[in-house]
Image (cartoon, grey):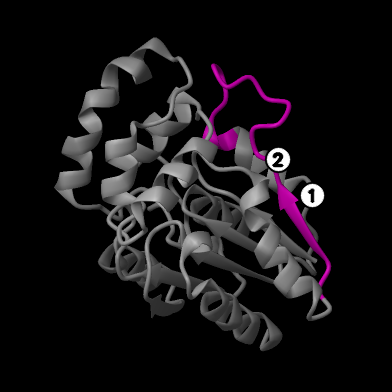
Amino acid sequence: MLIFVHGMLSSAEVWHPVIDYFNERGFSCRAVNLREGLDLRKVHIRDYVDKVKAMVTENDIVIGHSMGGLIVQKVAEEATIKGGVAICSAAPKGVKFRGGIVMASAKYAPKVIMGKPFKEDYKYVRKYMLVGVREEDARSIYEKLEKESAIVTYELGMNRIAVDERKVNCPLLFIATKDDRLCAPELVKRIAEKYNAEYRLYDGCHHFFYNDNWQDIAGGIHEFITGL
């Protein structure tokens, strides 16, 4: 089975077109809703990882976007799976990202301290996640985004989640998009190098679901997983 894991601010619904793509090619699929049933004032990345770990088997392939890509890495470290795909992945501890994104995120520190779930403002999302997307589409996408745990936001933003690459025993594929300013291509490439994993670069923005070429990315994933 293919297990799909969404990113911050997102939900399982974003995977529906991708799931249709793989269903048509004979794959059984399941999209995880990470926040469902959890208290967002208390939830940690650990809770999300445990939720995914509880549903995977050794024959499953886990595919994650952004934060979901980091969860793929943790699941591959702690469980036995057939393979993993991380798209525009958040970075594990030790793989540093650009200072600009850190500075831009600093204004949300009070919200993190308060511990109240929130989502970043439109200007931030537009600049870092939706580069090249038409304005009317970007507005529509933003309205669909959901609030995220302040604790999870802190853990990701402060690069707190460690992964021991020596414990990862399955093939991994890392995918980056050229216009991604949140998880930039050079960052994703460094993450791939941590695992000596395959790396591929495509056109488009961070939220690849909304790129015109999303089927090209799905095709690359299909090629990878059929080779496992």
How far is disc 1 from disc 2 in space, using C-alphas? 7 Å
Residue at the extreme front: 136
Q: 43 or 135: which is nearer to us?
A: 135
Residue labelled with disc 1: 55
Residue placed at 21% from the left, 29% from the top? Answer: 106
Residue placed at 80% from the left, 69% from the top? Answer: 59
Q: Quadrant of residue 112?
A: top left
The x, y position of residue 20, in whole percent, is 75, 67
Q: 135 or 6: which is nearer to us?
A: 135
* Quadrant of the snapshot with the C terminus: bottom right
The x, y position of residue 188, in whole percent, is 35, 65
The x, y position of residue 167, in whole percent, is 55, 61
Span highlighted in magenta in the image:
27-46
Left of 74 or right of it: where is 183? left
**Magenta region's main secondary structure?**
loop
Residue labelled with disc 2: 51
